[in-house]
Amino acid sequence: MHFSQLRRVAPDGANKKTSRVRVAVRLRPYMGKQDEKDEGPCVRGLDSQNLEIINWRNAMETVKYHFDVFHGEQTTQQEVFLSSVKPILPHILGGQNASVFAYGPTGAGKTHTMLGSSEQPGVIPRAVREVFNLVKAKDEEEGWDYSIGMSYLEIYNEKVLDLLSPGSQDLPIREDKDKNILIPGLTHTTISSFSDFDKHFIPASLNRTTASTKLNHRSSRSHAILLIKVVRTLHAFPYRQQTGKLYLVDLAGSEDNRRTGNKGIRLKESGAINLSLFTLSKVVDSLNSGTAIRVPYRDSKLTRLLQDSLGGSAHSVMITNIAPEYKYYFDTFSALNFAAKSKLIVNKPFTQETVAVPVLPVKRARENHEVGGSGTEPHKKKQKEEKKIEEDGSSPSAHFDRLAEPSVMDRLIALEKLMMSCQDKNRLDMLKDVAQSRKEIQELKERQREFESKALLLSRLAGDKVNVKQDPVFKNSTAPLQRKQTSATKPNKQQAVVQPLQVSSQPLQQLANIKPSVCIKKKLSDHIELPDGKENAVESGWESQLNTSLLEQLRQKILQILNTGSLKELKGLQQIGDKKAKLILGWREINGHFTKLEDLVKVEGMTDKRFSSFMKANILSAMGK
Ligand SMILES: Nc1ncnc2c1ncn2[C@@H]1O[C@H](COP(=O)(O)OP(=O)(O)OP(=O)(O)O)[C@@H](O)[C@H]1O
């Protein structure tokens, strides 16, 4: 029977909606040599979806990335298969397409993930076995006959080569009227069992073009693409037929030409690899951002070939492999940026040892390069301290010195720019917001520290002199604080007006509703709506009119918001604007928690009077609901 003459039908569940590419990241175990061992990893997992890598711009920070799935160093081949690949396989039997591809730097574990070894088989053998199992489990009664076939090819230097028929020429890629991608002339072999598959696959794998680079002895210089095709045909007239394709792709390594010493033919290979990987990144980005009108499949052979199995109604998974050693830092960083949906700079040291080491290695490297290392005294002192720290090798900046050649730095900067230009606007805005908020919190933290040291000075002076306020030394050294106090003495109408708490303060209001006292509410309202806006009339004594247990509950709730509330939740409190909320966050970062509500006066700009007014406004607001 000639199936090619039979009518093809649309796959089950196929629709016009473009599906996104699921992104998983797999971190392979540390494999540095013994003498490199002390360096430790530069990247580590946080949980099943997040990981962090040291920020090359500032070794005191980490950059946190979020993915659909994160597979840590201990993750087994079986776990990777079960969570990232197995769920998509049943779709192939229903006539839909799918692709699984391993992306990442050379030596980071792509081949291990896709192929594995006989002791630890990877995605390819497990997926093929599973397809056979799924077909076997199909009920005869459903009326379909299944046949499984395979093709195996590589894309090397933008040429499509048939691995089942070595020595063949570059094959063309075509598209039929139903938008299916075809490769005329490509060997397609029917396979009846897993061992049948193995018989064809193993010798074909040896035909794969590999060569050695400085980074990895067995570096793969081509994209190896295994196609498993499942065709199902109805027993009876009209002999409907459906074809599902599964592409299992071990991509070439994405090493950087200038670092790997590639010349001549290797350089040409790298150019082709980089072109196709760059196009793949644009395709994945277009599919996942959902904003692109045109997905640039045609810009490389790889993406053109995968066109009907990546996006559209296909099910796609990209497993990005990364390595933890510092020598892979640049590659890991670019692989993560390629794969990431979002990233966040976290102001947190990577290891405990780095906590006390305020180093800015990148900045220093560039400064040295640009201005010959000259600088002010404090700058020189800082450099000296940094040098000392780096000599004993305890700082991550020591590792970055190797990356800190101007050419590598320039490429990291260019990479970031490129990444930014590829991002959709929202992501860019989000990054800008994060950077801005961090800057503000940093400034506020510095001011808070200043404030605290002044407060300390004040308490010392209070021990020496009876009336601190008249101490001229203190007056001079606390100018900003005094400015705040001066403005606080002006009547502030807003402070006297009690408004309902905003959305984020809902729990506080709910709490107040437990035992509302109409009588008290009215009385309090009378007080707070004084026409002249003066708050002193209700500043004291108002608490005594409230039910004490309710008052305590409200106080606890406010304390909880102060201690755990987000910026938005803090701003939901009465009399806490954006600036004050950030000051509170800054105070929390430095000091931990407020033990009691009265501790709020330790935050810059919060006087006793303002605190009383704050308490009154929040409690009355909750009561007034
Ligand atoms: N998760 C892992 N667990 C144990 N060993 C691993 C793991 N991942 C990779 N390896 C080992 O690391 C080495 C490099 O891995 P692999 O050859 O798979 O890298 P690759 O990314 O495929 O490189 P290339 O681009 O050259 O193909 C191999 O010895 C491999 O066995």
Image (spheres, rainbow, N blue to C red):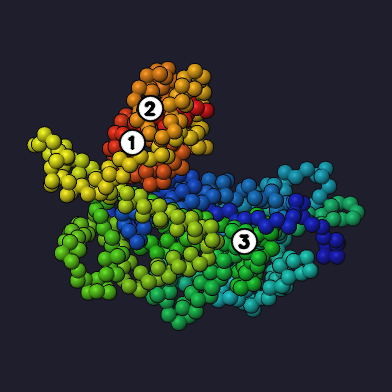
**At label 1, which amino acid type do we have?**
Arg
Image point (64%, 77%), residue name = 170
Query: From what the image shows, is residue 566 above or below residue 174?
Result: above
**At label 3, which amino acid type do we have?**
Thr
In the current view of this chain or complex, which residue is farthest to the left? 464
Of circles 3 and 1, the one toward us is 1
In percent of width and height, residue 150 lies at 68, 61
Decide if residue 486 is on the left or right side of residue 214: left
User: Residues under labels 3 and 2: Cα distance?
Assistant: 56 Å
**At label 2, which amino acid type do we have?**
Val
Within-10-Å neighbours for mark 2: few <14, some 14–19, many 20+: some
Query: From what the image shows, is residue 368 above or below residue 248?
Result: below
Image point (70%, 56%), residue name = 17
Q: Earlier in the sequence, mark 1 or mark 2?
A: 2
Residue 291 is labelled as 3
In the current view of this chain or complex, which residue is farthest to the right? 237
Within-10-Å neighbours for mark 3: few <14, some 14–19, many 20+: few
User: Residues under labels 1 and 2: Cα distance?
Assistant: 13 Å
Residue in the foreground of this view, choosing between 172 and 145 = 172
Of circles 1 and 2, the one toward us is 2
In the current view of this chain or complex, which residue is farthest to the bottom? 264
Q: Label 2, on which residue?
A: 538
Of circles 3 and 2, the one toward us is 2
User: Residues under labels 3 and 1: Cα distance?
Assistant: 49 Å
Is there any visible trace of residue 449 in the rendered image?
no
Residue 610 is labelled as 1
In percent of width and height, residue 136 lies at 72, 46
Question: In the structure shown, which secondary structural element does the residue marked by tag 3 occupy?
Answer: loop
Q: Earlier in the sequence, mark 3 or mark 1?
A: 3
